[in-house]
Amino acid sequence: MKLLQSVSLFIILVFLIGCETYNNGQYTRSGMAIGSVVGGVTGAVIGHQSGHSGEGAALGAVLGAAVGGTSGSSKDIAADRAREEQRQKLVQRNAAIQAEQAKQREQTIALGYQVTDQEVLEAEQRAAAAENQLKRIEKQRAEAIERKLRIDAAQQKEAEALEAAALLRTYD
């Protein structure tokens, strides 16, 4: 009986300590489940030898769940830390990208201060000249297509006329 009280006190202490580090993550739950099964079977075997297999199974299950849960909880905590480190790295990378973009904006603005009005005017004139050249080429192309269509139509008329003339010659 004294042994049972000592073990019960130990179990209560383990649960109180376990509540302090309780983590309801995947590893914690699976550790508790596996620990309770293994502890229950082990406790039943040991209890059977002393004539208390039911109490041994219950005690083993409780102890196994406590040990398995504590072990699983430490794995969950490690996984949480790893996720937090990944999140921090992502935040740092995004901050670096934003800083680089801000730096590029500032360089663009600084370059704008170095450009003279004459350079802007010349660039605008070059753009207008390029647009005029494009319009001229588009017009030339449209005219060429129109000429080709007129040639095709004339050749079609010629072929039809020659064919009609050939038909008329056969009746001579």
Image: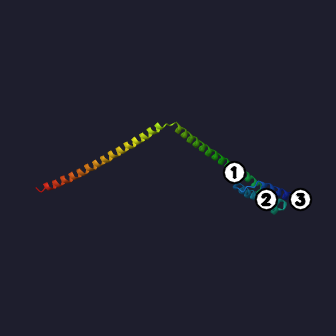
Amino acid type, mark 3:
Lys
On the image, which quarter does residue 58 sit in?
bottom right
Judging from the image, what secondary structure is the residue with disc 3 in? helix
Which residue is found at the position 60% from the left and 44% from the top? 98
- N-terminal label among 2 and 1: 2
Judging from the image, what secondary structure is the residue with disc 1 in? helix
Along the horizontal axis of the image, is 24 left or right of 8? left
- N-terminal label among 3 and 2: 3
Residue toward you, 19 or 130? 130
State which mark lies toward you, 2 or 1. 1
The answer to the question of whether label 2 and label 1 lie on touching residues, with beta carbons closer than 8 A, is no
Amino acid type, mark 2:
Val
Cα separation between marks 3 and 1:
41 Å
Q: How many marks?
A: 3
Which residue is found at the position 70% from the left and 54% from the top? 27
Residue 84 image offset from top left, x and y in percent = 68, 49
- N-terminal label among 3 and 1: 3
Residue 33 image offset from top left, x and y in percent = 73, 58
Q: Which residue is labeled 2 in the image?
A: 62
Q: Which residue is labeled 3 in the image?
A: 2
The N terminus, quarter of image: bottom right
Residue 36 image offset from top left, x and y in percent = 75, 58
> Which color scheme does this rendered protein use?
rainbow
Judging from the image, what secondary structure is the residue with disc 2 in? helix
Along the horizontal axis of the image, is 10 left or right of 132? right
Q: Which residue is labeled 1 in the image?
A: 80
